[in-house]
Amino acid sequence: MTPRLLFIEDNAALLQNLYDYFEGRGYRLDSARDGLAGLRLASGGDCDLIVLDLGLPRLDGLDLCRRLRAELAVQTPILILTARDAVEQRVAGLRAGADDYLIKPFALAELEARIEALLRRSRPGQTPLTAYADLTLDVANAHAERAGHTLALTPTELKLLEALLRAAPRLVRRSELEHLLWPDQPPDSDALRTHIHGLRQAVDRPFARPLIETVRGLGYRLVDPDAD
Ligand code: CA
């Protein structure tokens, strides 16, 4: 799932630069141009990280930060943007509950690196990744990729892939997979095969080397063709 960033920044030119840069990198973006609008969006809680300018009209960034943390108990990571000479502002920002700061003017690549670091810290274990060969599955977000390409999978295919990934490179028996999908009774003997076929279309067909192997009469497993 792509992270959603909230920029609270009154400088229109800087905001435009932020949009150009981060939209191009696949982030989802929201923004507010003053402190009160920012507070309203931030307290909605559906962004993953807030980039907060301190000098804002209507409600100062420091007050906004304090209110989010102390009054509204919002835990979203906050990165503050401050002026070069404002050491006491940076300290006050961190005391008010900000997680990091960046001094203006800054390189967008550095902002991105700090955002990535904060996002990593803020969700340890929340989105366990399961990986094998060039395949990754973000279980919590139901997002699978192979070699960096998103795989379009049905919920059933995601379940199958998760079971195969967790066992990889060991075999998972047909009966286990059937029990996983249909705890009461499998619909018919070809149903599992049909779903595996769909999974293969997404996971293996676009790529040179197949990962899903049929072990005849027993079940399926993932095998990395590059491993020995
Ligand atoms: Ca400002």
Image (tube, grey):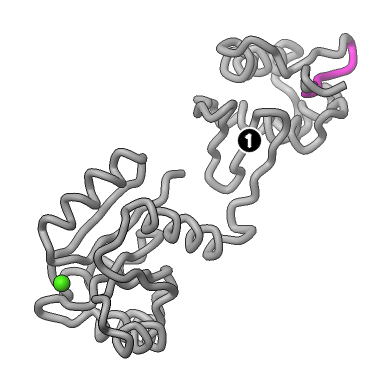
Q: Quadrant of residue 126?
A: bottom right
Depth order, front residue of 142/224: 224
The image shows residue 105 at horizontal and vertical percentages of: 25, 64
Depth order, front residue of 32/218: 32
Specify the segment rendered in magenta.
217-223
The image shows residue 111 at horizontal and vertical percentages of: 36, 58
| Residue 184 visible in this rendered orientation of the protein | no
Is 128 colored magenta in this rendering?
no
* 165 to the left or right of 115: right
Answer with the quadrant where ligand 1 appears in the image.
bottom left
Neighbor class of circle 1 (other Cα within 10 Å; few <14, some 14-19, many 20+) is many
The image shows residue 86 at horizontal and vertical percentages of: 27, 84
The image shows residue 208 at horizontal and vertical percentages of: 63, 10
Mark 1 Cβ inside 8 Å of ligand 1 = no
Q: Residue at x 74, y 33 (%)?
A: 165
Quadrant occupied by the C terminus: top right
* 203 to the left or right of 65: right
* 161 to the left or right of 89: right
**Residue that label 1 marks:** 136
Regarding mark 1 in the picture, which secondary structure is present there?
A: strand
Q: Quadrant of residue 206?
A: top right
Q: Residue at x 23, y 48 (%)?
A: 19
Q: How many marks?
A: 1
Q: Amino acid at mark 1?
A: Thr
Q: Residue at x 54, y 26 (%)?
A: 153
* 115 to the left or right of 220: left
| Residue 175 visible in this rendered orientation of the protein | yes
Depth order, front residue of 109/216: 109
Q: Residue at x 38, y 62 (%)?
A: 49
